[in-house]
Amino acid sequence: MKKENRCLLSAALVVLSCVNLVLTLYRIHLLLEERERRRNRVLEKFNAYVEKLKARA
């Protein structure tokens, strides 16, 4: 394999690795956002339940 081809292949692998890293980090970000949304929904339901109990008392 020619040296130029080897350099191009190495550069392409570096670029693809960087793209893969960015996509993986973005996926983690989306998963964390979804977890936060779910947690907030649970807290809102709990707070509504507490308010309902307070209204009865």
Image (tube, grey):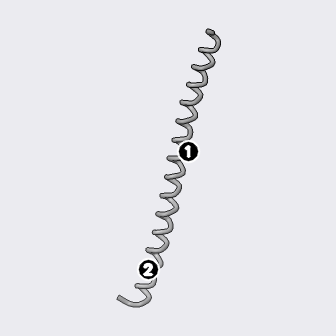
- Residue, far front: 57
Where, quadrant-wise, is the N terminus in this rendering?
bottom left
**Residue placed most toward the observer, 19 or 36:** 36
Q: Which one is earlier in the sequence, the residue at label 2 or at label 1?
A: 2
- The residue closer to the viewer here, 43 or 34, is 43
Q: Position of residue 28 (x, y in %)?
A: 50, 52
How far is the residue under mark 2 from the one under mark 1? 35 Å
Outermost residue on the left side: it is 1
Query: Which residue occupies 54% across, 30% down?
Result: 42
Name the disc covering residue 10, or none.
2
**Which of the numbered marks, if any, corresponds to residue 47?**
none
Judging from the image, what secondary structure is the residue with disc 1 in?
Answer: helix
Viewer-nearest residue: 18 or 3: 18
35 above or below 15?
above
| Residue 33 image label | 1
Q: In this view, does 46 lie above or below 17?
A: above
* Relative height, residue 6 to residue 56 (above, below): below
Query: Of the residues shown, which amino acid type is indicated by label 1?
Result: Glu
Count residues near mark 1 (Cα–Cα under 10 Å), then give few for <14, some for 14-19, many for 20+: few
Q: Amino acid type of disc 2?
A: Ser
Q: Which residue is drawn at 45% across and 84% down?
A: 7
Q: Residue 29: horizontal and vertical position, in percent? A: 54, 51
Secondary structure under tag 2 reads helix
Q: Which residue is drawn at 59% across and 14% down?
A: 53
Depth check, front residue: 1 or 55? 55
Q: Residue 34 at what x, y percent from top left?
A: 52, 42
